[in-house]
């Protein structure tokens, strides 16, 4: 991939397993957002997109959870966006412009992060394409601060920005178990807030989301560190992999118009279990959301 041609079908780097070489015929486009410029603890999430692709070679293309196969859909892997090192605002703006172009081309965007601030660019583009957008936020952290250490644009503020954009009443949060007292109070009063758990509250929310365009942003740290230790800010008490795959089965019932998976920091997990789990989640997302 080059800076001038992110759609270049001649991209010859590592690609996600089963990805086709033709952008025009693809239903979905995988794109990497290799940024960790505002990470506040352990860095390395910028390496996540590449490693998620690399380990996908060990992932089966058939999902027994969804009874679907990657061979049944078409998707293109555009590689990583050439984000400017150390410049979060410009990086997020590039992501926004890129995902806007994907919606204009009629593609389903599937983003790989990168820290969670990258989602601000993708979700802004989704909200522009779908003014009635709802957000499903699956994460260990509230990410609702107005600023973090004086910085307005941070991985700790991203969902607050989205609430300001689309309205907190359109934001559904699951699995949250870390944040300030003020963030928890604000979430309980303003968003659809479902802390600690994912599957059961998600099932209870489905009727509210039916018929609405939905964007899903999934932070890998929603998992207990026993399942996904390779992330910048691990939080104990999280979900397990079985619950996650069951949640994907429920999410396929919705009109999901975009998805991203963020905060995989592969150098923290030499066992590769985080990266492999993330790669399987990408498979499930492709099969659940690409119709």
Image: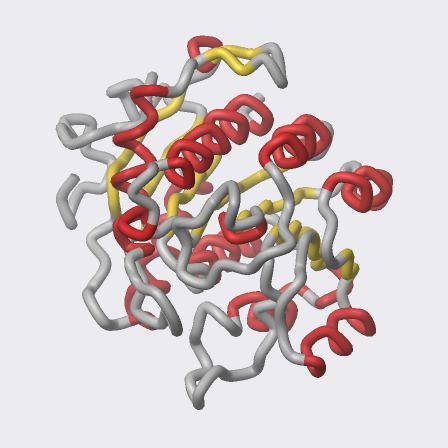
The structure residue drawn at horizontal position 41% and vertical position 54%, both measured from the top left corner, is 231
Q: Is residue 195 left or right of residue 13?
A: right
The number of numbered discs placed on residues in the rendered structure image is 0
Could you tell me residue 127's position as x and y percent?
Answer: 57, 55
| Image-quadrant location for residue 15 | top left
| Image-quadrant location for residue 9 | top left
Q: Is residue 142 left or right of residue 53?
A: right
Work out which quarter of the rendered image holds the C terminus and state it. Answer: top right
Residue found at the far bottom of this picture: 150
Q: Is residue 188 above or below residue 237?
A: below
Could you tell me residue 38's position as x and y percent?
Answer: 35, 72
The structure residue drawn at horizontal position 74% and vertical position 39%, both measured from the top left corner, is 199
Residue 129 in view here: no
Q: Is residue 182 above or below residue 261?
A: below
The structure residue drawn at horizontal position 44% and vertical position 87%, both measured from the top left corner, is 149
Could you tell me residue 246's position as x and y percent?
Answer: 68, 29
The structure residue drawn at horizontal position 68% and vertical position 26%, both measured from the top left corner, is 249
Work out which quarter of the rendered image holds the N terminus and state it. Answer: top left
Q: Is residue 145 left or right of residue 93?
A: right
Judging depth in this view, the residue of 222 and 104 nearest the camera is 222
Judging depth in this view, the residue of 291 and 100 nearest the camera is 291
| Image-quadrant location for residue 210 | top right
Could you tell me residue 234's position as x and y percent?
Answer: 49, 59
Q: Is residue 210 above or below residue 183?
A: above
């Amino acid at each position: 991939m080059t800076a001038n041609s992110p759609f270049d079908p001649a991209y010859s780097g590592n690609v996600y397993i089963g990805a086709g070489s033709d952008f025009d015929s693809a239903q979905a486009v995988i794109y990497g957002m290799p940024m960790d410029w505002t990470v506040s603890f352990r860095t390395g999430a910028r390496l996540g997109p590449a490693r998620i692709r690399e380990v996908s070679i060990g992932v089966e293309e058939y999902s027994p959870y969804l009874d679907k196969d990657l061979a049944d859909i078409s998707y293109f892997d555009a590689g990583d966006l050439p984000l400017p090192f150390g410049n979060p605002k410009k990086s997020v703006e590039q992501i926004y412009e890129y995902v806007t172009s994907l919606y204009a081309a009629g593609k389903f965007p599937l983003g790989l992060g990168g820290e969670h601030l990258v989602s601000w660019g993708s979700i802004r583009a989704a909200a522009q394409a779908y003014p009635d957008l709802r957000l499903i936020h699956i994460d260990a952290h509230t990410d609702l601060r107005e600023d973090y250490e004086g910085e307005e644009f941070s991985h700790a503020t991203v969902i607050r920005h989205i609430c300001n954009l689309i309205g907190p009443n359109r934001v559904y949060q699951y699995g949250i178990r870390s944040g300030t007292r003020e963030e928890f109070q604000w979430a309980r009063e303003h968003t659809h807030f479902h802390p600690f758990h994912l599957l059961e509250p998600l099932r209870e929310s489905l009727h509210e989301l039916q018929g609405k365009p939905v964007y899903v942003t999934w932070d890998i740290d929603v998992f207990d560190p026993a399942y996904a230790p390779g992330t910048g800010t691990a939080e104990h008490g999280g979900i397990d992999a079985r619950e996650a795959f069951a949640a994907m089965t429920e999410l396929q019932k919705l009109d999901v118009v975009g998805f991203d998976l963020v905060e995989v920091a592969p150098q923290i997990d030499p066992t590769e279990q985080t990266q492999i789990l993330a790669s399987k989640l990408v498979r499930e997302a492709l099969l659940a959301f690409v119709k």
